[in-house]
Image (tube, rainbow, N blue to C red):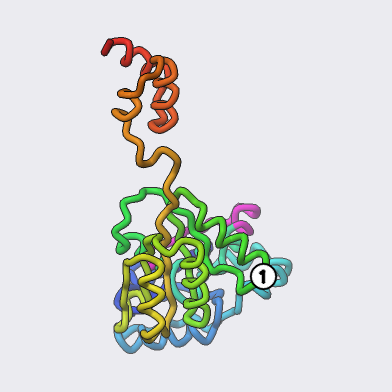
């Protein structure tokens, strides 16, 4: 069986009892970076007075996953196999999805333990009331792909969430500012860590602030949606227009998503 185990994104106390139990019972651990995983187990051993007995640690990351899967036997999963990324939830802007697909294709039992995740934590902290969002992970470093993806973010009518490194943060903010300096952004760095810090301002204000701040650490950027057509138009505004009821019904349906016939009948009832 395969178990995907989320690991803390900063605060060691965010590890769950289920995650610790899976790591204690693991006979083989696939790791994004074996050094990072071994260090985590060492810290947990010291803090919780635990003994992790697994000695089989294997690297599994973006650059070697195809080769690993090509040579992987189903028999390996007769024992307790665990996969962990360096921090947070596997498969969310981290490796692991191909290992899950391998299990699905080969009818191998697998499970995912819920746990720490920067994406959802930042979303909950942002104060945006939108219930939909698109997660873009890290933008390409440069070139056409980066330009196209950022344009997509800035034109989206639902919330957009990005990860960004400190090396490219100001570049990204400047590009956002140049497209729409008044767009509201929520930024947070070093989630759950000692130096966690967050901002919610216009793109221009945040860029001006962070030019003079310490921006070391990993960042999450949440971008307010672009206003949709008709967003500032009220139903009552349309009802008061000197237009035929059928035309009013079609306009109201466009901004509310309701059925045209039902709206038309409601308008007739008011006459």
Q: Is residue 87 left or right of residue 15?
A: right
Identify which residue is drawn at 43% across, 64% down.
Answer: 181
Q: Is residue 126 left or right of residue 96?
A: left
Asked if residue 249 lies left or right of residue 175, the reply is left
| Residue 31 on image: x %, y % | 54, 76
Inspect the magenta stretch and tell me whether residue 113 lies in it: yes
Q: Position of residue 167 (x, y in %)?
A: 51, 82
| Displayed quadrant of residue 141 | bottom right
Residue range highlighted in magenta: 101-117
- Foreground of the two, 60 or 143: 143
Residue drawn 43% across and 74% down? 219
For residue 90, say whether it is visible: no
Q: Quadrant of the C terminus?
A: top left
Q: Circle 1 sits on which residue?
A: 143
Q: Is residue 154 visible?
A: yes
For image coordinates 40% across by 21% down, the residue present is 248
Q: Residue visible at 32% across and 34% down?
A: 234
Residue 261 figure quarter = top left
Horizontal and vertical percent position of residue 103: 60, 57
């Amino acid at each position: 069986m395969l178990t995907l185990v989320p690991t803390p994104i900063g605060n060691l106390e965010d590890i769950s009892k289920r995650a610790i139990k899976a790591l204690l019972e693991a006979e083989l651990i696939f790791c994004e970076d074996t050094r990072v995983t071994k260090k985590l187990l060492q810290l947990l051993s010291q803090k919780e007075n635990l003994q992790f007995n697994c000695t089989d640690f294997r690297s599994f990351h973006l650059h070697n996953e195809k080769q690993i899967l090509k040579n992987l036997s189903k028999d390996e999963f007769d024992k307790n196999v665990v996969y962990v990324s360096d921090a947070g939830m596997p498969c969310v802007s981290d490796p692991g999805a191909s290992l899950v697909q391998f299990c699905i294709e080969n009818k191998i039992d697998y499970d995912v333990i819920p746990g720490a995740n920067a994406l959802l934590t930042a979303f909950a902290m942002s104060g945006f009331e939108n219930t939909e969002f698109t997660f873009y992970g890290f933008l390409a470093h440069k070139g056409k792909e980066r330009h196209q993806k950022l344009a997509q973010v800035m034109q989206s009518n639902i919330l957009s969430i990005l990860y960004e490194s400190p090396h490219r943060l100001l570049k990204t903010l400047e590009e956002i500012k140049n497209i729409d300096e008044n767009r509201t952004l929520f930024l947070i760095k070093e989630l759950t860590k000692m130096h966690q810090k967050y901002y919610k301002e216009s793109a221009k204000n945040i860029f001006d602030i962070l030019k003079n701040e310490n921006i070391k650490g990993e960042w999450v950027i949440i971008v307010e949606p672009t206003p949709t057509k008709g967003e500032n138009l009220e139903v009552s505004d349309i009802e008061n227009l000197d237009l035929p009821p059928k035309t009013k019904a079609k306009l109201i349906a466009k901004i509310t998503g309701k059925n045209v016939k039902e709206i038309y009948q409601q308008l007739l009832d008011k006459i």
